[in-house]
Image (tube, grey):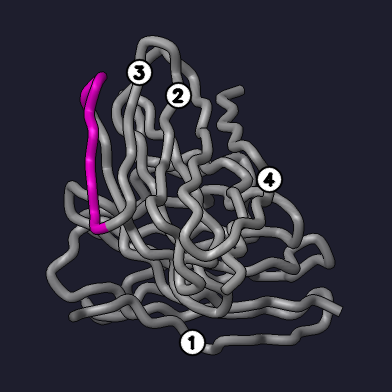
Amino acid sequence: ILNVEQSPQSLHVQEGDSTNFTCSFPSSNFYALHWYRWETAKSPEALFVMTLNGDEKKKGRISATLNTKEGYSYLYIKGSQPEDSATYLCAFRSGNTGKLIFGQGTTLQVKP
Amino acid sequence: EPEVTQTPSHQVTQMGQEVILRCVPISNHLYFYWYRQILGQKVEFLVSFYNNEISEKSEIFDDQFSVERPDGSNFTLKIRSTKLEDSAMYFCASSNQGPRDFGPGTRLTVT
């Protein structure tokens, strides 16, 4: 059974703090790793799709890295703002399927 | 910017009843999906649909479930005889080869 784990489960930071969280996924038969940002009552919003080992992607203050050999990805938020408060989901896609296998998410609360 | 829409936002039904959850994917997308999240659990894959047929389905997607793209714009998920354990948030998504665009979800409550 393919398993995707995220840590920590939740995180509370002060406005201006930088933060990061981890997604662990199977290191075999890797195809892609997706990151989503999900605010309550809204649609999950795609942040990144990462496919190559060593990939680094950036979108504003948010960036992500990928290590497919050891099966992990980090998501970084620089200078957190209250509007960054959301649940961040990662999802693994293996090579022989189109389905995404999700982690349980990291819920970030940024206090002003 | 185009987005995936879902109706209704919340559906309450009695056990044994049929429900149809509706989605309008992004118009130029070719791949369509249903996922669900039972409260407190991970988002889980149900089914993917391409070229007017199911391309992949999970063990959850048994004979009680069906999908249809009846008119080239809507994409529906039907649950024939709902069970208590079908209570969940159901998400529709669409894509081409890149990230999936998700709708806001339909919360299904089976009583």
Q: Are marks 2 and 3 on the same chain?
A: yes
The question of residue A69 being in magenta is answered with no
- For label 3, the residue is A68
Picture quarter with the N terminus of chain B: bottom left
- Give the mark toward the camera: 4 or 3: 4
Q: Do the residues bearing badges 1 and 3 touch, measured as CB atoms within 8 Å?
A: no
> As rendered, which of A18 and B85 lies closer to the eye?
A18
First in residue order: circle 4 vs circle 2: 4
Q: Are marks 4 and 1 in contact (CB under 8 Å)?
A: no
Q: Chain of mark 4?
A: A
Q: Chain of mark 2?
A: A
Q: Amino acid at mark 3?
A: Thr
- Compared to residue B102, the image places residue A67 above or below, namely above
Q: Position of residue A94 (x, y in %)?
A: 37, 27
Q: Which residues are magenta?
A: A52-60
Which circle marks residue B7 in the picture?
A: 1
Identify the element where label 2 is drawn: strand
Residue at disc 1, secondary structure: strand
Q: Amino acid under label 1?
A: Thr
Residue position for label 4? A9
Q: Position of residue A42 (x, y in %)?
A: 48, 77
Using the image, name the chain to which the residue with label 1 belongs.
B
* Subunit of label 3: A
Rate crowding at label 1 as few (under 14), some (14 to 19) or many (20 or more) other CA atoms within 10 Å: some
Q: Is residue A105 above or below residue B92?
A: above
Task: Identify the residue at image location x=46%, y=51%.
Answer: B47
Q: Is residue B52 left or right of residue B21?
A: left
Residue A87 occupies which quadrant of the picture? bottom right
What residue is disc 2 on?
A72
